[in-house]
Image: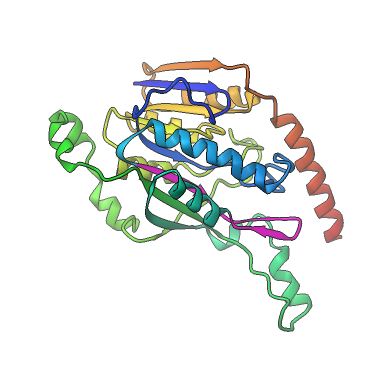
Amino acid sequence: MHHRIIFGDSRDMVELAQSSVHLVVTSPPYYNAPFDYPGLFSDYNQFLSMFKDVAKEIYRVLAPGRIAALVTDDMLVNGRRYPLVSDITHTMLGEGFRYRDKIIWVKPKGYTRISRRSGVAIQHPYPMYFYPDNIQESILIFQKGKFDYANIDLLQEKDREASKIPIEEYNAKDWYITVWNITNVLPVKGRIEEGVAAYPDEIPRRLIRLFSFMGETVLDPFLGSGTTAKVAKELRRNSVGYELDLELEKVIQRKLKNAGIKTDRLEFSKRTDGKHLRTKLQKMINAQRTVTRKNKS
């Protein structure tokens, strides 16, 4: 298997040929999320413009009939809520995708990262003071046209059989419904993804098993810490990942080298449009946390 990591802007995936990817699994950066991407975009329109360009490239490189799965959710920034789920859906439809499904990812109630919103109603137990804590995100599933199921019969038998969905797990863990209960990546010290917004391995693991075959190629245009590529490696798929932040190289290398078959080929390349972002973002995140602690005291 071949795993290719490109440090550069995924608005231009010039390295990939048309229809060369079989599945996209990704999570676009949440617009200026206070504890992940504060101030990354100058305004919401810049975020939407960026995503439109990436969506256009996703449509180009994705094979006919195949799936693009995006993990996202509406974002609260400085007291204003931005409708990412709606706007990302609208953008994907505008680029030609079909809207296939939406899965709600529910996190355990005890693991909310910020819980000040619901406390307002406790302090002021009157109507209009209610602000719920968010323990869910959306997994939006889009399809490029319709899939030709006759293509499954053209696969080598060993690949087809190795790609079978694990039905016992499918039933036991309720893959078959539109609500998935999965523990999020906890913000504990010492984890590989420390300081990086990352989704749990279980999300790409399910999506890769449900929507791709052994030996196919999985793309993540917002690779982050490398979770999608790691899981693709473990499941014997090829992977391509684009990541803008050059400072995540060591994190991605460590995650991929610890995963799957050791003989897999790993290729890292850097383009001139890569940027150094993590140090700057971390300083802004720490400043946000300082303000939050002062407000709580």
Residue 255 visible in the shown view:
no
14 left or right of 294? left
Where is residue 202? Give x, y as percent. Answer: 43, 45
Check if residue 7 falls in the magenta segment. no
What residue is drawn where x is 74% and y is 82%?
125
**Number of numbered callouts drawn:** 0
Q: Residue at x 48, y 52 (%)?
A: 89
Magenta-tinted stretch? 67-83
Which image quadrant: the C terminus? bottom right
Seen at 37% across and 18% down, the residue is 264
Based on the displayed image, in which of its 4 quarters is residue 261 positioned? top left
Which residue is at the front of the view, 61 or 187?
Answer: 61
**Quadrant where the N terminus lies?**
top left
Q: Is residue 95 above or below residue 133?
A: above
The part of the image, by quadrant, that contains residue 218 is top left
What x and y, as percent, mark residue 54?
A: 52, 36
Which coloring applies here? rainbow
The answer to whether residue 153 shows anywhere in this view is yes
Residue 69 forms part of the magenta stretch: yes
Horizontally, is 57 left or right of 168 in the view?
right
**Of 292 and 88, which appears nearest the observer?**
88
Query: Which x, y percent locates residue 8?
Result: 58, 24
Q: In which quarter of the image is residue 198?
A: top right
Q: Main secondary structure of the magenta part?
A: strand
Q: Which residue lies furthest to the bottom in this view?
A: 126
Q: Is residue 231 above or below residue 134?
A: above
- Residue 282 pos. (x, y %): 74, 36
Establish if 71 lies above or below 173.
Answer: above
